[in-house]
Amino acid sequence: MKSLYLTKIKGFCLALIPLILIGMIPQSTSWGLEKDTKVPSQTVEGVVYGRMKNNGAKVTDIYEKGEWDFTVYGDKNFTKDLEGIRLVNIMDSNNTIIINKSDFTISNERELTVKIKGSNAEKFSQEKYAGNYNLELKYKGEEIWIPIIGRYNSKNITITGQDFKKDIKQIVLKNIKNGAWEIVIPKQRVKYENDTKLTLTLEDKDVEKLSGGLNNSDIEVVIDYTSDCVFDKDLRYWDYTLIGENLRQGVEKIILRPISGRALSLPIEEQDIIIEKRDIRVVSNTRLNMEFRKDVLDKFREYNHSGDYKIIVVYSPGKGLREFTSGVDLKVLYNYGLRFNEKVTLKDKLQYNYKDYIEDTARFSLLSKSTPKVTDVYPKSNGGYPWIDEGELPHNALKDRSFLKVTFEDIDGKLEFNSPVGIEFLLSSSIKAIGSNIEYLDTEFLNMCRNDLANPNDDDYTYIFKKDRTKKEAYLYIPIKPLSPQTDYIVRIAGRVLRNDAVEEERYSSPITWEFTTMASPSVTDKEILNQTVIEDYSSDTYIKIYGDFFYTSSIRVFFNEKEADYIIIKKDNKGNTYLVVYLPRRLGSGLYNIIIQNDNNHSTITYGTLSVLPRGDRDNIPTEEYKVKNRDLKGDVLADIKVSTDTLYLSGRYTNRTIVELDLDELMGKEVWTRRINYKTYMGDYIGKLYTKSKYADVSFYNLGGNNSEVNLYIGRAEPRVVQGVKTKLGQRIVKSDFIEIRAQNCRWNTIDVSIPYKNSNGANLNIYRYDEIRRTWNKEISYIDYINQKVTCTTQKAGLFVILEN
């Protein structure tokens, strides 16, 4: 009897427990009409096991598309009794969205499609909702939400966005956001699909490490490549793929240069092994295949060529590209073969399953837009290419200043200047020429903007930061001081200049670093131009050679006065010297022609009166419409070019070997002629003790002027306006007090030159003569003295060049 009583009591208590538990559960209202302000309890009576697909998105993805679909796979759980779904933020249950029945579709008992749209999509396009969400189900007649517990099964991930090679040893994925894990994937689980696509197979434990989802900027991929070329008696060639940069600009050769081992004991001229141009096949701008022919392999078989080598890519001439040293380590093992090893680290630009993030397979991951994303910087050069015209870096509103430009992604329009402290961070940035401490950041302009940034309506604010909602971009403009040509610059922009609405630790722009190279003017002198004289009515295949440097293939042009060359080829001779093959334009009439070699409109070099087109008759029969005999004098004949302001004095032979020769150029040629040229032939032992030329623009004296069986050309006079325009910008704040005087000489030598230039608009105080150095592209002060009586400044120099008086 007692036992029966205890049994009844026990049964009553067991029946009471569920009622008590139900009483503890907060009661919600009817489904789909309204819900409690607090999330209902997650008390569980059952568990649904499943997995998901496309269950990750960025807030900006949902903002752009306006909705998002993802698929849930279960185990015969999705029946017509399924009444509701909700996504619950695992860190903050108040961030919960309810999916109405009209917003999900049951394909079958094992598959369910969920659509985030309307007000739910509007919420999930906001940063405050970013995070990981558990999926819970509610069935008809039930008050309890049942969670879906995801299973982390092995999966494949496709990686794209970079160049890949076949010879992969292993790949390591690293979480660089918090350093929580790394995943090592051996080559057996890496499938090389093509040059730009890999498929990785991740094990269960590796997939679980990806829980929560990650942006591509949070993942670093390290790829180890290795391959062996084993020496064999039948081995006749070996192919190797090299990843580089700017390869489509033209590769001249590849140098294999020893850095350690037995090969360094060879004479220096025998150490390098060359892969010739014929054995190089460029596949893309970043990829080439090179072939090791039998003669190269035979060299590597020798004991004296064993050791470690670096691989250097040499580009074709005229590209302005520096040699590129590959990151491949080449080891030559005697009696074995060649071993290639390379470690490549990649991030940011990679895509995972064609997205810039990896989602969690067991939860829904709403990823933050995170740190402001840079999509472009301008100007930018890789390996010194391309060259940038430093005079063409304008702002769309400010034409008198130069700016660098950084483009940011701004999909939802939430990117903004980090006012008021952003200007302080921008001021801590730097723009310097490589190897120099001179700062080119225009801090003066930034300081003018400092007080205006608090007012978003101020015009100065828009000079620094602008937005384009049509393109969904934002632009940061960095003001710079005038730059120099032919210079490599490195830009370091501080972080925290811009911000978006992401969480505090991720909302600020990161530091940005890049390099660019400014355009050079072609370097050439008259003596480096071959075939300077042709006869009119020359054939269509007539050309001249111009030796020099800094010829920019992408844009170089050559003019003879106003007529452009038919076409140009850039070559190198056997000694490695670069030269232009310039085919003459048709129907150049007889006369003297200036040759203008132009990389762009702001970077050109002029050689005056360099090309001479002679008539078929003698000189007295020269057509008057081309040039004419302007003056006949005991000291020689003066010929004037009709097309350009250039006169040439052909100095009589009786004056080419004298103690003193005095020439009044104004009297012989006229005061308004720009270019004055003196031409004469010298023989062994000829020299002029002092050649004194005078004019209203400058008096110039050469001392101990001589040649050696050569044709001497002297150019003395005002510099052409085009030349002045190119060099005047480098004077800075100095004030010009005279004409620019150009003194050039060909095929001769001298001891010193006296230069005396009249000054203008000055009392003579604080004046000096400066000479322009064409090699360094700088102005240098000459030791000068001032003649207050004749109002001239005089200097003695050993070098010809461009001269001007400046007020210090």
Image: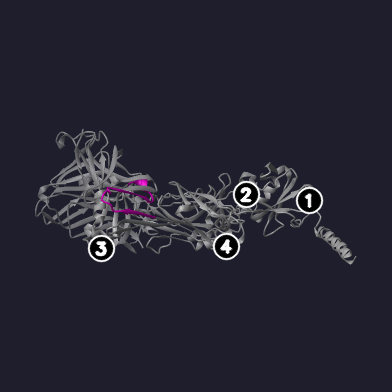
Q: Which residues are magenta?
A: 226-250
The span from disc 3 to disc 4 (Cα, nearest Å) is 58 Å
Q: Nearer the viewer, residue 383 or 704?
A: 383
Amino acid residing under circle 3: Arg
Q: Nearer the viewer, residue 171 or 76?
A: 76
Q: Secondary structure at mark 1?
A: loop
Q: Which is more foreground, mark 3 or mark 4? A: 3
Where residue 769 sits, quadrant-wise, is: bottom left
Residue behind mark 4: 421
Residue behind mark 1: 142
Q: Secondary structure at mark 3?
A: helix
Q: Nearer the viewer, residue 352 or 122?
A: 352
Residue behind mark 3: 262
The span from disc 2 to disc 1 (Cα, nearest Å) is 24 Å
Question: What percent of the width, then of the height, locates residue 459?
Answer: 57, 53
Identify the mark nearer the N-term, 2 or 1.
2
Q: Which is more foreground, mark 1 or mark 3? A: 1
